[in-house]
Amino acid sequence: MNQQVDQNLGEVKVIVFRLDSEEYGVDVQQVKSIERMEHITRVPNTPSFVKGVINLRGVIIPIIDLRNRLGISEKEYNDSTRIIIVHVEEMEVGLIVDAANDVIDIPDSAIEPPPKVVGGVEAVYLRGVAKLTNRLLILLNLDKILNADELKQLEKFGA
């Protein structure tokens, strides 16, 4: 048992997803589920990156287009498009991504602090960059994706 605990120290488990040609990761502990794209009900007077809300098993969840939020050009949704339901602060929020690939363990030693801009994404949204054997993974800081005012606005949706 202690050996297993020791092996898990110094690692972070992340959900890997894709936006455009870049791979991103979010801490699996903040992810509730990964859903297929479904009908989103538009809510008037919301920021452009808020696409609306969905009713997921009786829970109303605000949906954010992560491409729009991070300043990446828009793309039509397709069969690979997914909604990753995550916990941000005390809320559940859905993030639209191009595809959700896998779950991997990343040693802390492979994670470097974020440069000011990676792939056009500002450092404020980044937790770090993971250098893996044959790929780079941009780790998002979900707590910075929405600011306090935006969270208050989304709370009105019943999330």
Image (spheres, rainbow, N blue to C red):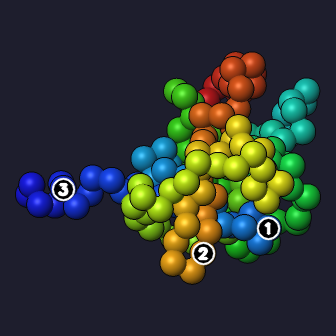
Q: Residues within 10 Å of mark 2 (few under 14, many from 20)?
A: few
What residue is at 91 percent from the left and 58 percent from the top? 73
Three-letter code for the amino acid on which mark 1 is drawn: Asp
Residue under label 1: 20
What residue is at 60 percent from the left and 64 percent from the top? 137
Question: If the image is split into quadrants, where does the C terminus sit?
Answer: top right
Q: Are marks 1 and 3 in contact (CB under 8 Å)?
A: no
Residue under label 2: 135
Hey, which quadrant is residue 96 in on the image? Answer: bottom right
The span from disc 1 to disc 2 (Cα, nearest Å) is 15 Å
The span from disc 3 to disc 2 (Cα, nearest Å) is 26 Å
Residue under label 3: 6
Name the mark nearer the viewer: 1 or 2. Answer: 2
Checking the image for residue 55, the label placed there is none
Q: Residues within 10 Å of mark 1 (few under 14, many from 20)?
A: some
Q: Secondary structure at mark 2?
A: loop
